[in-house]
Image (spheres, grey):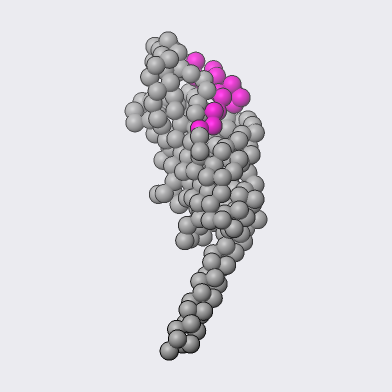
């Protein structure tokens, strides 16, 4: 009886190790897609040096390729500030979505995924590029990546500051300020996210 119990325990252990190996392999080698329902990108704006508001985008899509390259596309026409006229002004005046409808972030996260495979969690700095308003600029995000049953969740540990002047957005910011009759709109935007990728 004891021998049988040990035999079953060994079988379950082997099976568990096999499942873990398969999950690790899936993160390292299988393409994953962004789950929009479990993902969110948030940016903050501050007006008159005192009022800070959080905004999001309703439509973002993304993939992590089988070699660890992440691509996230942000539909700028889906900006959501909770005020319809402000959404429209951001689209037309700031982002100029008639010409630049999408912002794209790309990076190599293969090293992050490798660490997640080993430890189920990884704290890392991801260096990539953000293409926005016709400009492509290096950006860095400090992130925490957590393994889940069917993929990985990547979230920022702190906001990354996106500067309007790096993307030729300063004129749009100033125009929005004038239209809204504000004393100021801060041209540096803290940006954070939670992104869920699944096999």
Q: Can you say whether 89 is above or below 80 in the image? A: above
Which residue: 42% across, 10% down? Answer: 183
Left/right placement of residue 109 relative to residue 2 reads right
Q: Can you say whether 74 is above or below 82 in the image? A: below
Identify the magenta region. Answer: 159-174
Which residue: 62% across, 61% down? Answer: 29
Q: Can you say whether 186 is above or below 116 in the image? A: above
**Would you identify the image quadrant in which residue 100 lies?**
top right
**Numbered-mark total:** 0
Q: Residue 1: horizontal and vertical position, in percent? A: 43, 89
Q: Residue furthest bottom?
A: 1
The answer to whether residue 69 is seen in the rendering is no
Left/right placement of residue 172 relative to residue 109 reads left
The answer to whether residue 114 is seen in the rendering is yes
Q: Residue 59: horizontal and vertical position, in percent? A: 44, 43
Given residues 146 and 5, the one toward you in this image is 5
Q: Residue 62: horizontal and vertical position, in percent? A: 53, 48
Left/right placement of residue 100 relative to residue 46 reads right
Q: Residue furthest front?
A: 2
Q: Residue 75: horizontal and vertical position, in percent? A: 48, 39
Which residue: 48% across, 46% down? Answer: 195
Which residue: 61% across, 31% down? Answer: 134
Residue 169 in the magenta stretch? The answer is yes
Residue 163 in the magenta stretch? The answer is yes
């Amino acid at each position: 009886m004891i021998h049988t119990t040990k035999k079953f325990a060994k079988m379950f252990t082997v099976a568990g190790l096999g499942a873990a190996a398969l999950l690790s392999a899936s993160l390292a080698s299988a393409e994953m897609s962004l789950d929009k329902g479990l993902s969110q990108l948030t940016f903050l704006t501050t007006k008159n040096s005192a009022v800070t508001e959080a905004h999001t985008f309703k439509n973002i899509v993304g993939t992590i390729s089988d070699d660890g390259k992440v691509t996230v596309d942000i539909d700028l026409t889906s900006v959501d500030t909770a005020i319809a006229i402000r959404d429209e002004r951001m689209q037309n005046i700031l982002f100029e979505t008639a010409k630049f409808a999408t912002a794209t972030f790309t990076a190599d996260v293969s090293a992050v995924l490798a660490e997640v495979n080993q430890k189920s969690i990884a704290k890392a700095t991801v260096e990539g590029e953000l293409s926005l308003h016709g400009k492509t600029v290096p950006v860095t995000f400090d992130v925490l990546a957590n393994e889940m049953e069917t993929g990985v969740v990547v979230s920022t540990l702190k906001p990354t500051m996106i500067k309007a002047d790096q993307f030729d957005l300063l004129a749009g910011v100033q125009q929005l300020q004038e239209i809204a009759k504000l004393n100021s709109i801060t041209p540096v935007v803290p940006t954070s996210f939670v992104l869920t990728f699944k096999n």
